[in-house]
Image: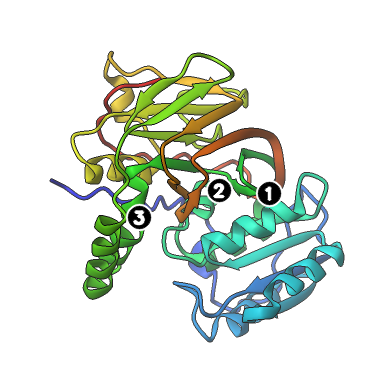
């Protein structure tokens, strides 16, 4: 069976080829005033590296704005994020993993500074959805030169936010193993796989959408309006319940997050929901924007219409697409 991974979509612009040319001053976006920018860099994240902070400073030197680059450090990371937000920059760039990007966006909220999560992790679900590229240097320049404010909606569960997709149920147990396999870490993938088997999540989950009757399912995927190709307006999270042939098949479908092909099947139905209750006999494994977590056996997911303001290039990148098949749908 062919492995499905989140695709990289490159949107060429005239400036991309010169992104590291050092060709002199470059113009900032005309869509929003940027006089001060802060960039949070985690050099330990999946695709960042120890030279990233210096590379960011070199890029920002090409633009007529005040810039501060902050390297995030272990135990002080939360305090550094809070300080950066409190300093009220015009835009707060985040070059780190998916979890850090989510944390910054949720703390900034709809009234905080513009947030630009750059692809610095492994899955990079939110950055790819916003910028259409896995190259953080390209994303940084596109945001600086063509960015405009865009309100991003999402979901919240047990104090954790997600802005692309949440996966709930047995397929979520395999998230760490799948990601280790994707990055070539076979030994780590084996370790995670054995751990998933030991913690095997048995039984179906029960799902209630907006107070409706409970339905049983193997897995539930909640997709944000920004990602969903089934909704034209930000009216709720797209809810899809699946009964896949096996967990691997379900996770490949869900982790792609940018669905399209399987919606052509006449048996597939989707439904927007603003409040989703999920119940099981034991704690519920979940993956929120690529980050695995465990939730209480009775938990509620809430739709957030205006979660935060992102700095996104105009025109917006076209959505990438994945492929797969689905089973039963709520």
- The local secondary structure at tag 3 comes to helix
**Gap between marks 1 and 2 measured at Cα:** 8 Å
In this view, the residue farthest toward the left is 1
- The disc placed on residue 310 is 1
Q: How many residues crowd around disc 2 within 10 Å: few (fewer than 14), some, or many (20 or more)?
A: many
Q: Position of residue 95 (x, y in %)?
A: 59, 68
Front position in the image: 301 or 138: 301
Q: In whole angstroms, how far apart are the C-alphas of marks 1 and 3?
A: 27 Å
In the depicted structure, whether residue 25 falls above or below residue 201: below
Left or right, residue 101 beside residue 65: left
Of pointers 1 and 3, the one earlier in the residue sequence = 3
Pinpoint residue 305: horizontal percent, then vertical percent.
68, 32
Which quarter of the image is occupied by the C terminus?
A: top left
Mark before the other along the chain sequence, 2 or 3: 2
The numbered disc on residue 130 is: 2
Against 283, residue 97 (above or below) is below
Q: How far from the left and from the top, in percent, is residue 322?
A: 32, 40
Label for residue 175?
A: 3
Left or right: where does residue 36 sit relative to residue 96?
right
Proximity of marks 1 and 3: CB atoms separated by less than 8 Å: no
Q: Residue at x 63, y 65 (%)?
A: 94
Q: Residue at x 51, y 79 (%)?
A: 44
- Mark yes or no: residue 316 visible: yes
Quadrant for residue 282, please give it: top left
Label 2 sits on a secondary structure element that is: helix
Q: Residues within 10 Å of mark 1 (few under 14, many from 20)?
A: many
Of the image marks 1 and 2, the number of the one nearer the N terminus? 2
The quarter of the picture where the N terminus appears is top left
Q: Is there CB contact under 8 Å for labels 1 and 2? A: yes
Per the model, the C-alpha gap separating discs 2 and 3 is: 22 Å
Disc number for residue 89: none
User: In the picture, residue 280 is in which quadrant?
Assistant: top left
């Amino acid at each position: 069976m062919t492995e499905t991974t989140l695709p990289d979509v490159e949107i060429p612009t005239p400036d991309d080829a010169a992104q590291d040319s050092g060709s002199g001053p470059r113009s900032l976006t005309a869509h929003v005033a940027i006089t001060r920018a802060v960039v949070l860099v985690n050099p330990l994240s999946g695709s960042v590296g120890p030279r990233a902070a210096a590379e960011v400073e070199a890029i920002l030197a090409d633009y007529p704005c005040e810039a501060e680059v902050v390297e995030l450090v272990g135990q002080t990371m939360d305090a550094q994020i809070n300080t950066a937000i409190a300093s009220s920059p015009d835009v707060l760039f985040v070059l780190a993993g998916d979890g850090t990007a989510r944390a910054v966006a949720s703390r900034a909220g709809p009234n905080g500074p513009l947030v630009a999560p750059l692809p610095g992790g492994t899955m990079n679900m939110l950055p790819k959805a916003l910028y259409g590229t896995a190259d953080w240097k390209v994303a940084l320049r596109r945001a600086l030169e063509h960015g405009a404010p865009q309100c991003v909606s999402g979901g919240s569960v047990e104090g954790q936010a997600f802005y692309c997709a949440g996966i709930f149920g047995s397929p979520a147990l395999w998230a760490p193993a799948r990601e280790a396999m994707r990055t070539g870490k076979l030994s780590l993938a084996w370790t995670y796989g054995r751990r998933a088997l030991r913690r095997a999540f048995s039984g179906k989950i029960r799902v209630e959408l907006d107070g409706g009757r409970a339905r049983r399912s193997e897995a539930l995927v909640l997709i944000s309006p920004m990602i969903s190709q089934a909704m034209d307006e930000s009216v709720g999270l797209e809810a899809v319940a699946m009964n896949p042939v096996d967990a691997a098949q379900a996770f490949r479908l869900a982790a792609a997050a940018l669905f399209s092909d399987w919606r052509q099947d006449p048996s597939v139905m989707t439904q927007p929901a603003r409040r989703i209750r999920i119940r099981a006999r034991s704690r519920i494994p979940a993956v929120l924007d690529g980050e695995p977590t465990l939730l209480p056996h009775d938990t509620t997911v809430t739709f957030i219409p205006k979660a935060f303001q992102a700095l996104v290039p105009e025109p917006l990148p076209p959505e990438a697409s994945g492929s797969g098949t689905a089973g039963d749908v709520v």
